[in-house]
Image: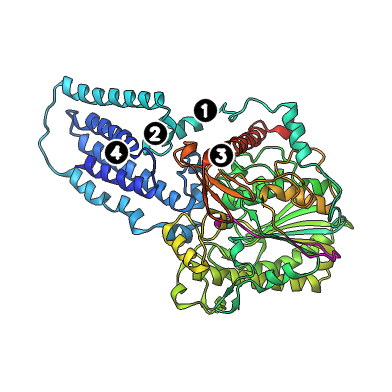
Amino acid sequence: MLSLLLTLKILLFMHITRVKHNRALVFLISLLVILFCYSLIYLRNSRKKYSLGFLFYAAVSLIIFVDVVYYSYFNALPSIRMVKQIGQVPAVGDSVKTLLSFRNLLFLLDLPLAFLYSRRKRSIRRFNRYISWGIPGGIALTLVVSLAILSRLGLFGPVTNQELFTYHAKDIKKAIMKEDIGDIETLTGKDIADLKKRSEFVEGKYTGLGKGKNLIVIQVESLQNFVINHFHKGQEVTPNLNRLIKEKGSLYFNNYYQQLGRGNTSDAEFVSHNSLYPSMEEPTYVQYEQNTFYGLPWILRDNGYTAWALHGYEKDFWNRKRAYVNQGFQRFISQEDYELVETIGFGLTDGEFFKQSMAYLKELDSIDENPFYAFMITLTSHNPFEMPERHQYLNIRDEYKDTLLGNYLQSIHYTDKAIGQFIEDLKREGLYEESVLVIYGDHFAINSLNENDQKLMTQYLGYPYDLDEMLKVPLIIHIPGLEANETITRVGSMLDFLPTILNIMGYENQKGIMFGVDLINYEGENFVAPQTYALKGSIITDEILLEMSRDGIFENSRVYNIKTRELLNPLDFIEEHQMVIEEINKSNYILKTDFFAQ
Ligand code: GP9
Ligand code: MN
C-alpha cells in the first residue's frame, strides 16, 4: 500500500520537477529502488517491519517535499551540503510560505494517516529465506544491471540528474569526496595569461574619473530590469532610479544579468566584488569563508580607502559577518547597529536603513583624509513583497491586486522612494558630488520558470517573459563631474562589475585574476554563463540564449534568438557551450585550490 502511494508521489515529483527527457527510464529506476526497499522491509519475519515501512515512507516523503519546495524557487534540486543552511529557513519564512502550495504540501499531508495505517494490528506472514532474500536480491540485481545498461547507452548522467534516489546518492557521494578539486587538473600559464589579458586595465572611456572619490554601492533586493522606465496605470514605478539614469554622469547598463550560485543574494555580492563564478555546492561565503580573496574592498583598501558593509539584517545571515573579513571589509554595520523602529518582512525597512546609515557614512568619511567604500544592501523589496497599507503608494490595476506582480510593484516602488530620499540626503551632506554611486539589483523577483507567473508576466508586459527578461537586473553607475550620459546595451553580468568599476575608479587589480571584462572598454565579444535557473553550460550573448537541457544532454537544449525569439539549432552553438563550461571550471579551480593564498 505505502509502496503504491510512494510511486504516485514519485510521479507527482517528476511532474513538478519537469522531467522532460527519458521519463520512462527515470521512472523505472525510482520504481526499482522503491520495490527493492519495500521487498527488503516487508519480506522480513519481524514485527518491526510495518514501523520500518512507515519510516521509509516518511523519510522519502520528506525528502521529496524539501526537493519540490527548493525546486519551486531555484528550479534545481538541492544539495545535501545545503543542510548546513537550514538555520536560515526561519528568516525567509514568509518567502517559504509562498512556496508551500497545496501541491507541495500533499507530500506530507498523508503522513498521519499512513502512520495509523502502519500501526494496524495484523498477523505476521512468514516467508522462507529464499523469498525474503531472493526477491530483494533479484530486484537489486535488476537495478544494477539497468544502471549499467544506462551507462553503456550514455544515459546514466541524463537519467540520474533527474531521478530522485540516484540524484541524491550522487550528490552525497560528491559531498563526501573531499579531495574533489573540480573538473580541471590545473590552470596553465597560458590560461592565466589569457584571463589577465581579457580583464586588463586599459586607458579608455571614463577611465579614472572616480579616482580619489568615495564609492557607494547599493545592492537592491529583487530589483529587476523590467521595472526601469516602467509605468503602471500611468504611474512611474521607479521615478527616482529613472531620474538618476537620465542625469548627467550616469551610465545605465540595460543588458546586465544576475550571476548566482547556491548563495543567492550573497553571491550577487561575491561575484560583483571578486569577478569569480560562485560555488554551486554551498553558498560561497560558507564554503570558502577562509579563502584568500583580492576583490574590490581589498583593492580599494590598497589604494587608501576604508571599506565598510552595511545591511539592516542579522549579521550571521548568509555567513556575512565571518565571510566579510576575508572579503576585505573592515567593519560590518548590521541589524544590531540599527534601531529597529520600523520593520517589514525580514526586518528594518529600507527607509530607516538609509536614514540611520547616514550617521555611519559620516563616521566612515571622517576616519581619515582618504576616500571610503560603502557597500549597502537593501532588504524591504524581498519576496513575498507584501507591504503594509501605509507604504502602498501605487494604485494597482484590479486584475493585479494581491498578485505577486502587484505586490512586487508596490514594494519596489517603496524601495525606489527610499533610495530617492537617500540621494537627497547624500546631496545635503555634500557626499553626492564626492562619490561614485552605483545601484544594481541582486536578482529577479518573478520567476519565469513558474508557469502561472510566466503567463501573468507575458500578458502584462505584452511580450514573452522568458529567462532573458527574468535574469536581467539594472546596473546604474553615476560619476560626479562627468558630462556624458550613456545607456550601455552590450551583454554583461555581475562577473563584469569588478573590472568595469575598477577602470572607472582608476585602480588596477595587481594580483587577482578576473573572469569578467570591462564593459565599457573591452573590445572583444562578451557572454554570460549562468548556472542557476539555466544550468551550467547555458550561455547568453548579445544575440542568443542557450538554455542547457535539464537532463544534461546538449542536443535537448533550447536556443533562441533574443531579439526575434526564433528557435535555433543547439548544435550550432556547441563551441560556445563548451567554452562556458571551461570558464566555470577554471574559476572553480581558483576557489578549490585557494589560488590567491599561494
Ligand atoms: C538577507 C537578504 C536576503 O540578509 O540579503 O537574501 P535572499 O533571500 O534574497 O537571498
Ligand atoms: Mn535577495
Side of 423 relative to 589 (left or right)? right
Q: CA distance from mark 1 to mark 3?
A: 36 Å
Q: CA distance from mark 2 to mark 1?
A: 16 Å
Q: Disc number at residue 177? A: 1
* Viewer-nearest of discs 2 and 3: 3
The residue where tag 3 is placed is 572
The answer to whether marks 2 and 1 mark residues whose Cβ atoms lie closer than 8 Å is no
* Three-letter residue code for mark 2: Thr
Q: Which residues are magenta?
A: 470-487
Look at the numbered disc 3 and say if its residue's Cβ is closer than 8 Å to ligand 2: no
Q: Kindly tell me whether residue 290 is visible in this rendering.
A: yes
Q: Disc number at residue 56? A: 4
Q: Position of residue 313 (x, y in %)?
A: 60, 59
Q: CA distance from mark 4 to mark 2?
A: 16 Å
* Three-letter residue code for mark 3: Asp
Q: Say whether disc 1 or disc 4 marks the residue closer to the N-terminus.
A: 4
